[in-house]
Image: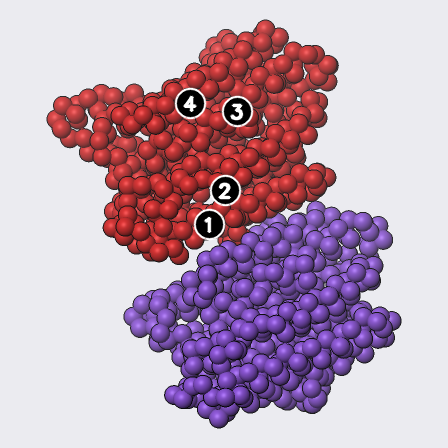
Amino acid sequence: MMMNYLLFISVLLPLLASPFTYLLGRHSWTYGAILCHISCLIPFLIILYHAPIIMAGKQLYETYSWIPAFGLNLNFMLDSLSYPFALLISLMGFLASVYSHRYMEHENKLEVYYPLLQIFQTGMMGVVLSWNLFMLYIFWEIMLIPSYFLIAYWGTGNPRLIGFKYFIFTHAGALCMLLGIAWLNSMFGSMDMSLLLENVPRSYEIHRMSLLGVATLIFIGAAVKMAVFPFHTWLPDAHAEAPTPISVLLSGVMIKTGAYAFSRLILDLMPAAVSEMSAWLMPLAVVTMLWGGLMALVQNDVKRLLAYSSISQMGYILFGLSSLIPIGASGGLFHVLNHGFAKGLLFMCAGALIHEVKERDLTKLGGLASKMPVTAITMLVAGLSIAGTPPLGGFASEWMVFSGAFASGATLLTAIAIFVTAITAAYYLRMIRAIFFLELKYKEVKEVPISMLFSMSILLLLVITLGFINAPILSIIGRAVSGQIGI
Amino acid sequence: MDFTPSPLHVLIILTAISPILAYVSRKFRLECVMDVYSVIGLAVVFYFAIIQMLNVTFQGSALTLTGLREGTASIILIDKLSAYVTFVFVLVGLASALFSVGYIRERKTEYYPLLLTMITGMVGVASSGDFVTFFIFWEMMSLSAYVLVAFRYKSWEAVEASLKYLIISSAGTAAILFALSLMYGIAGTLNMNLLSTVFGFQDMAGKVWSYVILALLLAGLGVNAAIVPFHTWLPDAHPAAPSPISAMLSGVVIKTGIYAMFRVLAVIFPSAIYNWGIALALYAAITMTVGNLMAMLQEDIKRLLAFSSIAHIGYIVFGISLATVNGLAGSLLHVLNHASMKGLLFLSAGAFIHATGTRNLDELSGVGRKMPISGTTFAIGAFSLAGIPGLSAFVSEFQIITASLEAGMLPFTIIMVLNVLISVAYYLRVIQIIFLKPLTSVSEKAHEVSPLMLIPVVALAGLGVCIGIYPSPFLEMTKAIAGSLLAH
């Protein structure tokens, strides 16, 4: 009934195309860049094409034989949980690639930049589509290595040190996750998700202590990626100093794979463990959002402010997921999309400033609203969306998160979480005021090139429309959540 | 008896002829004859090693050549384990010889006979069915290794390192010899198969002498394999040798000790009776931790790689200490992966040294951008040994970790995972220095080495990627070998 190889292509096409991108790029970087755009666009079209199937409640599953000795197949699964993530990743990958075209044009070694971007894209798609924990771990690391090089070579500030910190933190988390996966494998003799989904929830009572250990290890792995409070220190450096298109992908997309790992490996496999752990997961989530918000309030660097804001927003996502109430968990997953699009858009706007004004310090910017009207409007809308202003996307998802958290009985924590949205609004409005109003300090500034505006306008459209035309995506998310928590 | 040439036969003949050929070629000032002779000879041996491995592994036939008197005769026994490690030894040997063609410029007529002697010794160790033959080949390997470390005898560093190696290693050999004499005293034979029937019984476990023998053997083999606290010679000897020899020493010579441990521990003194698992795991944990921590502190690229070898020996010994099929299979696969990847790293580092003349990491900064091919292969080797998935060493490390969880050794598993993280830190540091740091006055002048030297490097890197992406045949094979060892 369905065409084969589609998921295989959507995961591995960018990786397979990367050597050609390099070879073309050595001739002229523009050709390489165009190949990169195309190879990132096709997966998005494939994912988008499957929307009706997923909405009808079906799944797309492909399997290829790989390492029989480990009982390993190359399995890909597109179901209602991975669909929103795959959509987000493939779209943002394409837009970031297009955005790079003009943004990075004056940098060195672009023939290496675009292949790395493609491999990064493959890693992220692979994490959310693979149906086998071993594969998931491999893609998890494929995601890390190119992003490390992208930060350490094209980054600003002290990129090698920051890249090193990023690599070590994330790899430490990944090794915790690997230990958890290996432990699961030694208990159940398989790393295939279908088998695990069948066996693990049933035998939770028997293996309670071991499974709690596994859940903790996997949570640490996911938490480092999500930058949950004690594990967050790598994020402000890496996201602020990476080249902007990569910041878009890191903050908009990559940290969401942590949320995916949390919901797939812990919520799906061991919901009982989450309900035991939620007594400290929810406070941790609130501390994360409060800490990120307070730190964002005092930043003067645009990108650093956005990076701290990402930490804060990941707190909302974890808060919603760990409430274990269907509407809260749906809100958490929906916030993945809303925050992904809005934060990607904000980083693109920050990149527009860096590209046109060559300045990212809030105290030195000012009065740009008349010079860069489109950037001003998009930045305002995206900031308001994250701050939870109706009728934008962020409002819908935060509303769901708070409803779920109230329903789970954590009244005080929810009150704090709602208070944090006021902090969010405060730092975004402060940022908008400092950049676009006050006295104009730059005369010779014009709007960004059309290809960058293209990426920004698509995201702007999504940020606005997800606020009220969200029934289709919410139906998919709702099905994913009801599969996990059950109503 | 049907005679098919085994790699050992070919090697012995090659080695025996090589001094004569060396003498003649020096007379006629045609030293490049030795290049061609060694490389082609080793290629032929490599071919036979593959054939032998396939024969032994898939047809299950163990080759035995024996003298007349049972009990004291010299025996050549080639089972699955021997054939497998022979393949590993000859693989790295061939790569080093090929690299030497471009790297070794002076005194080729002395170099190649010594290299061939060393490879013959190693293959002989792996093929011996009794401990006398084993000991003779062991000394053949060790003596040529001492001389090769001091190959550049005009530098004081090399001579000092070689002397240190000689003294410590001889002490280890003496321990082995003493253990052998005790074993002969108890069992009346040094035939490995007969010994396993003597010591493999429950009532031998109560005897003090059994444990004395075991301890002496482990100490002696531990010196060769550089298990902490017997490791101190390694970080001096491996960097001092010429790079292809470093690749041999770190890649495979220390694996002969590991090979002997497989024989002694899994077959002759089985864990079920002598119960050495936890003790050995403790040594393994100390070894990997010391190796990794020391590697973090190094400024010399070859010294860093040498300490990393100690750490990886720790992983391998940890796999052995589990004494299960999965653990042994992981260790065996890690023997191949570490040998090929560490060989690759030393050869790539040799290419840097060849091009810049320095081993100091600060001076080498940015050299990978000047030498893109050897830089990339170095990065592949480094990422592989750092345990990045998709490359070979990850597969075996994962196998060892899973096996240790199955065996219920969670604390040791956590130590190993922490160690893997430390190894990522220092390998990442080296990769950063080589690729991302600005050029220095030394590294600016570097040019890519000759294609002949790049062949072995690229081939080993390709092997690393292949095993990483498609490990099934290798895993199946090592599992079969581990199963046959434990079936004794």
Q: Nearer the viewer, residue B98 or B364?
A: B364
The subunit carrying tag 4 is B
Camera-near label (3 vs 2) is 2
The subunit carrying tag 1 is B
Q: Nearer the viewer, residue A393 or B439?
A: B439
Disc 2 marks which residue? Answer: B296
Name the residue at 54% across, 88% down. A437
Camera-near label (4 vs 2) is 2
Does residue A326 appear anywhere in the picture? no
Colouring of the image: by chain
Q: Is residue B17 left or right of residue A286?
A: left
Could you confirm whether marks 1 and 4 are on the same chain?
A: yes
Task: Supply the letter of whichever chain is purple.
Answer: A
Name the residue at 68% across, 30% down. B278
Q: Distance of mark 4 from mark 2, alpha carbons? A: 23 Å
Disc 3 marks which residue? Answer: B230
User: Whole-percent x and y of residue A375?
Assistant: 51, 87
Q: Identify the disc placed on residue B165.
A: 4
* First reached walking from the N terminus: tag 1 or tag 2: 2
Q: Identify the disc placed on residue B429.
A: 1
* First reached walking from the N terminus: tag 4 or tag 2: 4
* First reached walking from the N terminus: tag 1 or tag 3: 3
* First reached walking from the N terminus: tag 1 or tag 4: 4
The subunit carrying tag 2 is B
Task: Name the kind of residue labelled 2 in the image.
Answer: Met
Q: Is residue B99 left or right of residue B74?
A: left
Q: Is residue A398 left or right of residue B58?
A: right
